[in-house]
Amino acid sequence: MERFNCMMEGLRKFNVAVTFTALFFVVIGALLMLTPINLFGQESVTTQSSVSSEGWAFLAASLSISVSVLGAGIALSKIGAAAMAALAEKPEIMGSAIVFAGLAEGLSIWGLIVAVLILMKV
Protein backbone atom coordinates (compact mmCIF):
# COMPACT_ATOMS: atom_id res chain seq x y z
CA MET A 1 0.00 0.00 0.00
CA GLU A 2 2.89 2.33 0.76
CA ARG A 3 4.29 1.78 -2.73
CA PHE A 4 0.90 2.66 -4.24
CA ASN A 5 0.74 5.90 -2.22
CA CYS A 6 4.27 6.79 -3.30
CA MET A 7 3.35 6.15 -6.93
CA MET A 8 0.19 8.27 -6.64
CA GLU A 9 2.19 11.13 -5.10
CA GLY A 10 4.63 10.94 -8.03
CA LEU A 11 1.72 11.09 -10.49
CA ARG A 12 0.29 14.15 -8.72
CA LYS A 13 3.64 15.93 -8.99
CA PHE A 14 3.87 14.93 -12.65
CA ASN A 15 0.35 16.27 -13.28
CA VAL A 16 1.26 19.63 -11.73
CA ALA A 17 4.47 19.77 -13.78
CA VAL A 18 2.62 19.02 -17.03
CA THR A 19 -0.02 21.65 -16.23
CA PHE A 20 2.56 24.36 -15.62
CA THR A 21 4.51 23.35 -18.73
CA ALA A 22 1.36 23.57 -20.85
CA LEU A 23 0.55 26.97 -19.34
CA PHE A 24 4.08 28.16 -20.11
CA PHE A 25 3.77 27.14 -23.76
CA VAL A 26 0.34 28.79 -24.03
CA VAL A 27 1.83 32.07 -22.79
CA ILE A 28 4.79 31.80 -25.18
CA GLY A 29 2.43 31.01 -28.04
CA ALA A 30 0.23 33.98 -27.16
CA LEU A 31 3.23 36.28 -27.17
CA LEU A 32 4.37 34.95 -30.52
CA MET A 33 0.93 35.27 -32.07
CA LEU A 34 0.35 38.81 -30.88
CA THR A 35 3.80 40.17 -31.76
CA PRO A 36 3.77 42.00 -35.10
CA ILE A 37 6.71 40.49 -37.00
CA ASN A 38 7.46 40.58 -40.71
CA LEU A 39 7.36 36.87 -41.63
CA PHE A 40 7.22 35.02 -44.94
CA GLY A 41 7.38 38.12 -47.12
CA GLN A 42 4.44 39.91 -45.53
CA GLU A 43 3.96 43.62 -45.92
CA SER A 44 5.81 45.57 -43.28
CA VAL A 45 3.83 46.53 -40.22
CA THR A 46 2.98 50.22 -40.26
CA THR A 47 2.42 50.75 -36.56
CA GLN A 48 3.68 48.83 -33.58
CA SER A 49 0.29 48.79 -31.87
CA SER A 50 -1.63 47.22 -34.76
CA VAL A 51 -2.43 43.56 -34.19
CA SER A 52 -4.10 41.65 -37.00
CA SER A 53 -7.20 39.57 -36.52
CA GLU A 54 -5.24 36.57 -37.81
CA GLY A 55 -3.09 36.65 -34.69
CA TRP A 56 -6.17 36.58 -32.49
CA ALA A 57 -7.62 33.72 -34.55
CA PHE A 58 -4.44 31.66 -34.16
CA LEU A 59 -4.42 32.41 -30.44
CA ALA A 60 -8.06 31.34 -30.12
CA ALA A 61 -7.40 28.13 -32.06
CA SER A 62 -4.37 27.26 -29.97
CA LEU A 63 -6.25 27.97 -26.75
CA SER A 64 -9.23 25.85 -27.81
CA ILE A 65 -6.97 22.88 -28.50
CA SER A 66 -4.72 23.28 -25.47
CA VAL A 67 -7.47 23.87 -22.93
CA SER A 68 -9.69 21.08 -24.25
CA VAL A 69 -6.82 18.56 -24.32
CA LEU A 70 -5.71 19.59 -20.85
CA GLY A 71 -9.28 19.22 -19.55
CA ALA A 72 -9.66 15.86 -21.26
CA GLY A 73 -6.41 14.67 -19.72
CA ILE A 74 -7.50 15.67 -16.24
CA ALA A 75 -10.92 14.08 -16.74
CA LEU A 76 -9.42 10.90 -18.14
CA SER A 77 -7.03 10.59 -15.21
CA LYS A 78 -9.94 10.72 -12.77
CA ILE A 79 -12.15 8.43 -14.86
CA GLY A 80 -9.34 5.95 -15.47
CA ALA A 81 -8.51 5.66 -11.78
CA ALA A 82 -12.17 5.20 -10.85
CA ALA A 83 -12.72 2.69 -13.67
CA MET A 84 -9.74 0.56 -12.63
CA ALA A 85 -10.96 0.54 -9.03
CA ALA A 86 -14.45 -0.45 -10.15
CA LEU A 87 -13.12 -3.15 -12.51
CA ALA A 88 -11.15 -4.69 -9.67
CA GLU A 89 -14.41 -5.28 -7.82
CA LYS A 90 -16.79 -6.01 -10.74
CA PRO A 91 -15.09 -7.05 -14.00
CA GLU A 92 -18.40 -7.20 -15.88
CA ILE A 93 -18.71 -3.38 -16.01
CA MET A 94 -15.78 -2.99 -18.40
CA GLY A 95 -18.03 -1.75 -21.23
CA SER A 96 -19.36 1.11 -19.13
CA ALA A 97 -15.85 2.12 -18.11
CA ILE A 98 -14.76 2.30 -21.75
CA VAL A 99 -17.80 4.44 -22.62
CA PHE A 100 -17.00 6.93 -19.88
CA ALA A 101 -13.37 7.13 -21.01
CA GLY A 102 -14.57 7.76 -24.56
CA LEU A 103 -16.75 10.62 -23.36
CA ALA A 104 -13.71 12.28 -21.81
CA GLU A 105 -11.73 11.83 -25.04
CA GLY A 106 -14.59 13.44 -26.96
CA LEU A 107 -13.79 16.69 -25.20
CA SER A 108 -10.45 16.94 -26.97
CA ILE A 109 -12.09 16.15 -30.33
CA TRP A 110 -14.49 19.06 -29.82
CA GLY A 111 -11.55 21.37 -29.12
CA LEU A 112 -9.93 20.27 -32.37
CA ILE A 113 -13.17 20.83 -34.31
CA VAL A 114 -13.55 24.33 -32.86
CA ALA A 115 -9.93 25.15 -33.75
CA VAL A 116 -10.43 23.97 -37.34
CA LEU A 117 -13.61 26.05 -37.64
CA ILE A 118 -11.77 29.12 -36.33
CA LEU A 119 -8.87 28.62 -38.72
CA MET A 120 -11.19 28.11 -41.71
CA LYS A 121 -12.48 31.66 -41.16
CA VAL A 122 -8.96 33.17 -41.41
Image: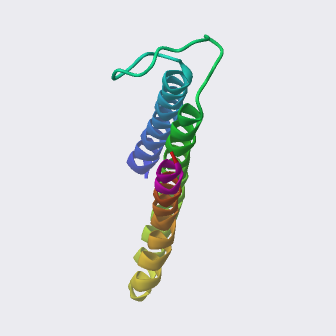
Q: Depth check: 55 or 68 in front?
A: 55
- Check the image and tell me how it is coloured: rainbow
Residue drawn at (58%, 29%) of the image:
52
- Is the residue 5 above or below the residue 50 in the image? below
Q: Position of residue 4 (x, y in %)?
A: 41, 50
Residue drawn at (46%, 54%) of the image:
116
Residue drawn at (55%, 42%) of the image:
63
Outermost residue on the left side: it is 40
Q: Position of residue 65 (x, y in %)?
A: 49, 48
54 lies left or right of 50: left
- Is the residue 98 above or below the residue 65 in the image? below
Is 33 one of the magenta-colored residues? no
Magenta segment main secondary structure: helix
Q: How many marks?
A: 0
Q: Depth check: 113 or 55 in front?
A: 55
Outermost residue on the bottom side: it is 92
3 lies left or right of 46: left
Q: Position of residue 94 (x, y in %)?
A: 40, 82
- Is the residue 35 above or below the residue 20 in the image? above
Q: Position of residue 62 (x, y in %)?
A: 50, 41
The region drawn magenta spans: 116-121
- Is the residue 47 above or below the residue 114 in the image? above
Q: Depth check: 97 or 24 in front?
A: 24
Quarter-of-image position of residue 42: top left
Residue drawn at (55%, 52%) of the image:
71
Q: Depth check: 51 or 79 in front?
A: 51
